[in-house]
Image (spheres, helix red, strand yellow):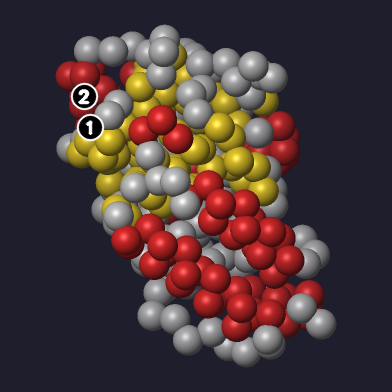
Amino acid sequence: MLSQVADGVWVRQSEWVWSNATVVRGDSGLILVDPGINGSDLNQLADDVDQLGIPVVAGFSTHPHWDHLLWHSRFGDVPRYATAGCAQAASDARERAQAMAADSASGIPLELIGLLTPLPADGGAMPGEIIEHEAHATGHAAVLLADRGVLLAGDMFSDVLIPLLDARRPDQVGAYEAALERLGAAARNVDVLVPGHGAVAEGPEVAARLAADHAYIDALRRGEEPVDARLAQDWLAGPHQSNLEQARHSSG
Ligand SMILES: [Zn+2]
């Protein structure tokens, strides 16, 4: 079921790790952001989109982890955009993403995983502003829909998952700090924040989400183990197990 969170913005949550697929109405039609997860979810999303009666003109993947690289033929043969860094990383890791999808979920069209195109310079069909940063995954993008007061955050600011650092790259604490600064500036002007996983934040909850991620990263920076009730989903995106060790190393 789609729930409308703002004018022309709908969210459908899957049971699998509370994953949020977002449907955004642009000038020329609908854009599906991170549609997922199981085949049954994708089919229900297609039903919901059919009911809106507006054509799907594009997809968008916020980052190159398998659960954000999915598609279904019912959404149509349209460009699926990402940042250039994300599109390249998704292409490089496509077989691994297919294997992880097959292991983790059911009914996913594996042949459609990760077929991304770099967003054209004029933004193509994508509305809003793309905020690219290097936290969590290569080429991670948030989408700021300023006119509707919405930030689509990808895998940042979840209420169910702790910040997941990319242990394969250096100085992820620094990358996370830089991302929080940029996204914090963007989030000051929104009423609705849609994370990749978990509940949609509205009103004062938006600032609380930002504060929770800040507190977590600040603790890592101090070399402490963060006290945080959220879950660490090690299997979400691969080798996050050494998250904390890596963070300790990179924060010196
Ligand atoms: Zn995710």
Q: Which mark is residue 44?
A: 1
- In the foreground, 6 or 32: 6
Whether residue 177 sits left or right of residue 169 in the image: it is: left
Q: Is residue 149 above or below residue 188?
A: above
Whether residue 73 sits left or right of residue 248 in the image: it is: left
Quadrant for the N terminus, please: top left
**Amino acid type at image mark 2:** Asp
Residue under the point 51% across and 22% down: 126
Q: Is residue 153 above or below residue 77?
A: below
Circle 2 residue: 47
User: Where is residue 15 drawn, in percent x and y?
Assistant: 27, 53
Quadrant for the C terminus, please: bottom right
**Amino acid type at image mark 1:** Gln
Helix, strand or loop status at disc 2: helix
Residue under the point 60% across and 83% down: 219
User: Where is residue 56 drawn, in percent x and y?
Assistant: 38, 16
Residue under the point 38% across and 58% down: 206
Whether residue 193 sits left or right of residue 84 in the image: it is: left
Contact between labelled residues 2 and 1, with CB atoms less than 8 Å apart: yes
Whether residue 99 sits left or right of residue 49 in the image: it is: right
| Residue count near mark 1 (Cα–Cα under 10 Å), binned few <14, some 14–19, many ≥20 | some
| Residue count near mark 2 (Cα–Cα under 10 Å), binned few <14, some 14–19, many ≥20 | some
